[in-house]
Image (tube, helix red, strand yellow):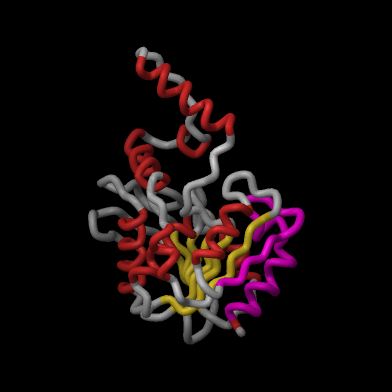
Amino acid sequence: MKVFDGTNVNYIVLGEGSSYVVFLHGWGGSIESFKYVAENLKLGKKCLIVDFPPFGKSTEPKTVWGVEEYARALKEVLDKEKIQKFDIISHSFGGRVAIYFSSVYTDMVGKLVLIDSAGLKPKKSFIKRLKVAFYKLAKSFGFYFNFGSTDYNALSPHMKKCFVKIVNRSLKPEAKTLKLPTLIIYGENDKDTSVYMGKRLSKLIKGSKFIVLKNAGHFSYLDNFYEFKPLVENFIGG
């Protein structure tokens, strides 16, 4: 379906039930990132899975989108499906959208699951700070080096602008306002959004439950699905 600026957003609905769970994938992912999970979790609810633009079968945004625009696009999908109350299961970038959405549309979200979620400024290592300083110095002399992440370098010029807008936005203020039941899950070996970030989120979201999955990385819900599965089923269904 087309949303507010003419961008096409693809989504599917799976399962049976009178209520909904909305799945929000990470940056560069698609419906396929969560389809296996939605099909194998016993939640007793319908599952709506979105392709965030420009991934999967969704088109590239026509304007520079940040977290706010992605949340607005999600709201239009939900309005089309006449979904007024639902739970969210989100991963990485999807967590950014979930945190912002839940802070704005406070009456729509029942329970929130954040898996290896992004949204806070990462703790920079000495090496990372040194690279940034070197890049800025080189740039001042007219030299340019490609220090961008793999995710960033794979994007079109337009989507790079979106990416920069997204990652420079801290959702700490929004996270502090959340009062809904929240389950925060991180992989112990996550190198993209570390356990440190999960602990910070847990402190910001009052009453949240924080769990670290063993032998799991950034895709902890797939790396350790058999531990992840009962945790989420009990949380969403309980």
Check the image and name the residue furthest to the left.
Answer: 5
Count every numbered label the image shows and give the total: 0
* Viewer-side residue, 86 vs 202: 202
Instruction: Give the percent coordinates (x, y) of residue 213.
Output: 71, 60
Instruction: Give the percent coordinates (x, y) of residue 184.
Output: 59, 65
Image quarter (top left, top right, bottom left or bottom right) of the N terminus: bottom left
* Viewer-side residue, 55 vs 188: 188
- Residue 23 sits above or below residue 60 on the image: below
Q: Quadrant of residue 232?
A: bottom right
Q: Residue visible at 65% across and 49% down?
A: 190
Would residue 213 appear left or right of 53 to someone viewing this image? Answer: right
Q: Residue visible at 48% across and 86% down?
A: 18
- Residue 46 sits above or below residue 49 on the image: below
Q: Residue visible at 52% across and 31% down?
A: 129
Q: Is residue 215 magenta?
A: yes
Q: Which residues are magenta?
A: 208-236
- Residue 134 sits above or below residue 182 on the image: above
* Viewer-side residue, 52 vs 11: 52
Q: Is residue 15 magenta?
A: no
Image quarter (top left, top right, bottom left or bottom right) of the C terminus: bottom right
Would residue 229 appear left or right of 114 to someone viewing this image? Answer: right
Q: Residue visible at 31% across and 49% down?
A: 65
Instruction: Give the percent coordinates (x, y) of residue 71.
Output: 35, 61
Instruction: Give the percent coordinates (x, y) of residue 60.
Output: 34, 46
- Residue 179 sits above or below residue 147 on the image: below
